[in-house]
């Protein structure tokens, strides 16, 4: 199989392409592949794909893209190219499970089955901004969630009262981030729980700075090394991938999702983009956990709620294709329109959590897509999505039953105004690890309505 050093060489010697030319070529190629492989939404209002042959065609389209076009390195302005045999070999090497953490806090995260009924993994928190006065206590609260397998780090713009800018301050901030994570999981009684570094910046010195088996990243921890939108990678992340591969950390592709409304076009093109980026994360960085699916660029700016069936269907195709042809450990569910402390956010999250076992993905961080300082997530949402996904597994939702429930949930919020997020201190008690009385009332109301729709809670 291709090594990361092979990838590094190809990023220096591949064909030179201007970035604008790459973007326009991406648009044209995705359109060609969508037509050639007949990837089309069935126009029946379905939220889940039921055509295995379509998922197979989508995967073949992704392989053709990688073999014919490759992946763009924005650092060198060159294309990393692959042969079909190299791609086939890499696909076989993708692991189906990853061990994270150490001691009694070690967890095995695996590729769950389509229509899973027994177990689902979860990364419950962070990948969001929190200021330093909240950070350690926030980490502790998320680490207290029993279903959590690992936690991702946080980002922030000030540390020790100083603005974070420039490599020296960024490297220092990176180490402080890991110190807060270590302190938080220890206070939660889970000292061996895995954490994954959410980069303060993507410069290689800053990516490597928190590598420290005592106070920072241990060999059983991880780091986020994501493929960029429009199938792009960069040298600093590749540098970190090489160093961390030798060190032993697991790596997370937080950027496996395709985007409707970008250079790849509509939902059909976003399906291929997502598959290419999901495979690309393993090829270029050796990412073994992948947050993937399909989302919309407009989600972060929309002021009206809409749980679009075409986008949901497109994500379903992606997960099915990856399950049918690889062992990729998939996550999904991050990035929603509304924010914490609101009813609309809980409905959005319930929609994604119902889809998780049906489509075979583990639960990724439930947060507002347009993340805001101290107002992007609370532990309640993480506990909520796990509760809903578990209820969906218990209910044995498959085929038409899952479609019926997804339609009901989508209809519940269609056209509602997107509610602004509530500051974590106003909707969650971080001292006693519980939601505010008002937020708990909202949560119980949504839960009661979902139960009346047929979801079997305990």
Image (spheres, grey):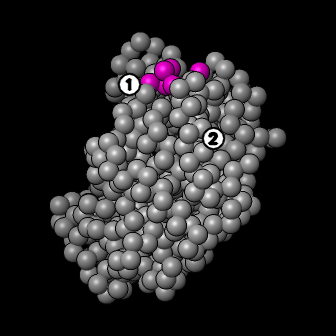
Q: Tell me the quarter of the picture where residue 9 sits.
A: bottom left
Quarter in which the N terminus is drawn: bottom right
Q: Measuring 72% from the left and 40% from the top, which residue is drawn there?
A: 146
Query: Which residue is labeled 2 in the image?
Result: 383
Above or below: residue 333 compared with residue 212? below
Secondary structure of the residue carrying numbered label 2: helix
Q: What's the mark number on residue 338?
A: none
Badge 1, how many Cα within 10 Å: few under 14, some, many 20+? some
Residue positioned 28% across, 51% down in the render? 298
Q: Nearer the viewer, residue 253 or 88?
A: 253
Image location (x, y in percent) of residue 311: 38, 64
In the rendered image, the residue lying farthest to the right is 104
Q: Nearer the viewer, residue 305 or 297?
A: 305
Asked whether 441 falls inside the magenta stretch, the response is: no
Q: Earlier in the sequence, mark 1 or mark 2?
A: 1
In the rendered image, the vertical position of residue 90 relative to residue 222, given as above or below: below
Residue beneath the point at 35% across and 19% down: 163
Q: 365 or 90: which is nearer to us?
A: 365
Query: Which of the 4 image quarters holds residue 300?
Result: top left
In this figure, which residue is indicated by the disc labeled 1?
A: 157
View extreme (front): residue:
452
Secondary element type, mark 1 = loop
Q: Is residue 264 left or right of residue 287?
A: left
Q: Which residues are magenta?
A: 423-429
Q: Position of residue 255 (x, y in %)?
A: 43, 54
Question: Mark 2, residues whose alpha carbon is within 10 Å: few (<14), some, or many (≥20)?
Answer: some
How far, Cα to Cα, is label 1 from label 2? 28 Å
Q: Nearer the viewer, residue 203 or 329?
A: 329
Q: Residue at x 74, y 33 (%)?
A: 190
């Amino acid at each position: 199989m291709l090594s990361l050093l092979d990838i590094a060489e190809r990023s220096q010697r591949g064909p030179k392409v201007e970035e604008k030319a790459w973007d326009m070529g991406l648009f044209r190629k995705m359109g060609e592949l969508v037509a050639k492989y007949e990837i089309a939404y069935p126009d029946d209002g379905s939220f889940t794909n039921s055509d295995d042959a379509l998922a197979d065609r989508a995967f073949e389209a992704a392989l053709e893209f990688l073999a014919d076009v490759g992946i763009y390195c924005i650092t060198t302005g060159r294309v990393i190219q692959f042969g079909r045999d190299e791609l086939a070999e890499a696909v076989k090497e993708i692991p189906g499970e990853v061990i994270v953490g150490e001691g009694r806090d070690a967890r095995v995260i695996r590729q769950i089955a389509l229509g899973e009924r027994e177990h689902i993994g979860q990364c419950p928190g962070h990948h969001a901004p929190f200021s330093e006065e909240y950070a350690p206590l926030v980490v502790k609260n998320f680490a207290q969630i029993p279903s959590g397998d690992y936690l991702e780090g946080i980002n922030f713009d000030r540390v020790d009262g100083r603005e974070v800018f420039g490599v020296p301050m960024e490297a220092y901030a990176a180490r402080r981030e890991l110190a807060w994570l270590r302190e938080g999981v220890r206070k939660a009684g889970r000292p061996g729980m895995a954490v994954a570094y959410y980069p303060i910046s993507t410069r290689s010195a800053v990516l490597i700075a928190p590598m420290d088996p005592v106070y920072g990243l241990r060999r059983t921890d991880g780091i986020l090394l994501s493929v960029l939108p429009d199938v792009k990678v960069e040298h600093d992340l590749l540098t970190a991938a090489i160093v961390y591969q030798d060190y032993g950390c697991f790596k997370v592709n937080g950027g496996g999702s395709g985007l409707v409304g970008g250079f790849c076009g509509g939902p059909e093109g976003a399906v291929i983009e997502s598959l290419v980026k999901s495979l690309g994360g393993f090829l270029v960085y050796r990412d073994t956990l992948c947050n993937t699916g399909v989302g919309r660029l407009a989600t972060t700016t929309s002021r009206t709620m809409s749980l679009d069936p075409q986008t949901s269907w497109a994500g379903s195709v992606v997960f099915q294709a990856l399950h049918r042809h690889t062992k990729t450990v998939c996550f999904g569910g991050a990035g929603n329109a509304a924010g914490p402390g609101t009813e609309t956010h809980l409905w959005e999250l319930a929609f994604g959590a119902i889809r998780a076992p049906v489509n075979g993905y583990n639960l990724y961080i439930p947060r507002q897509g347009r993340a805001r300082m101290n107002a992007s997530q609370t532990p309640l949402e993480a506990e909520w999505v796990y509760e809903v996904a578990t209820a969906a597994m218990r209910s044995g939702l498959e085929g038409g039953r899952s479609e019926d429930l997804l339609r009901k949930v989508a209809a519940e919020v269609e056209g509602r105004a997107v509610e602004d997020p509530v500051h974590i201190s106003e909707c969650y008690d971080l001292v006693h690890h519980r939601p505010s009385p008002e937020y708990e009332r909202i949560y119980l109301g949504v839960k009661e309505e979902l139960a009346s729709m047929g979801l079997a809670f305990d």
